[in-house]
Amino acid sequence: MTNPFADTLHLRVRPSAILKYLTLLLHASAAVIIATLAVYRPPIALLLPGIAVAGTYAWRRAGLRTSGAIVRLRCGGDGVWHWQTASGAWHEGQVTSAVCVGPHLVCLGLRPAQARLRVYSCALFSDALSEDGHRHLRARLTITRSRERTNLRARP
């Protein structure tokens, strides 16, 4: 019997409808609140263009149409992560943070090996990956985390 976590995990990221509509909802809500407050304090309306620009960028990022958006992930059995951005560039590095929110969402922070300050962030809702891919990713992150805890306790 082979260990499925020793195999390389290949994931192709699709644009997430959940993330796009959540982005739209949050920015539209902010615009409505600011517009309502602007009735009583007109200078507050100057914030609306900023909300529109941020909302447009967030919508494009959720649709994987920015150059830094992650479109592919690959993790080998050795724990080294590779990812491809929408610009076509491949990066190698490690996971700096990983949060799993049930079976619905995985948030990753990925740091390239050659850059200490750059961190790529990736929010992967369940519709951004195949069902098996999302499940395997959550399992891989859970097992990696438990191994790290065990290794920390074993050190003198």
Image (cartoon, rainbow, N blue to C red):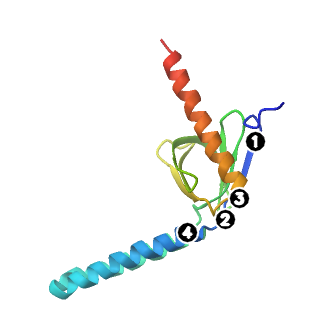
Marking on residue 130 = 3
Q: Secondary structure at mark 2?
A: loop
Q: Amino acid at mark 3?
A: Ser
**What is the C-alpha distance between the residues marked 4 and 3?**
14 Å
Query: What residue is rendered at 66% in x and 65% in y?
Result: 14
- Where does residue 118 sit, x and y in percent of width and height? 49, 49
- Where does residue 47 sit, x and y in percent of width and height? 28, 78
Disc 1 to disc 2: CB gap under 8 Å:
no
Marking on residue 8 = 1
Q: Amino acid at mark 2?
A: Arg
Q: Quadrant location of residue 71?
A: bottom right
**What is the C-alpha distance between the residues marked 3 and 2?**
9 Å
- Where does residue 150 sit, x and y in percent of width and height? 54, 23
Sequence-first disc among 3 and 1: 1
Closer to the eye: label 1 or 4: 4
Label 2: few (<14), some (14–19) or many (≥20) C-alpha neighbours in 10 Å: some
Q: Which residue is mark 2?
A: 14
Sequence-first disc among 3 and 2: 2
Looking at the image, can residue 23 be seen? Answer: yes
Left or right: 46 in relation to 149? left
Along the line of sight, the residue nearer the viewer: 18 or 152: 18
Q: Secondary structure at mark 4?
A: helix
**What is the C-alpha distance between the residues marked 1 and 2?**
19 Å
Marking on residue 18 = 4
Disc 4 to disc 3: CB gap under 8 Å:
no
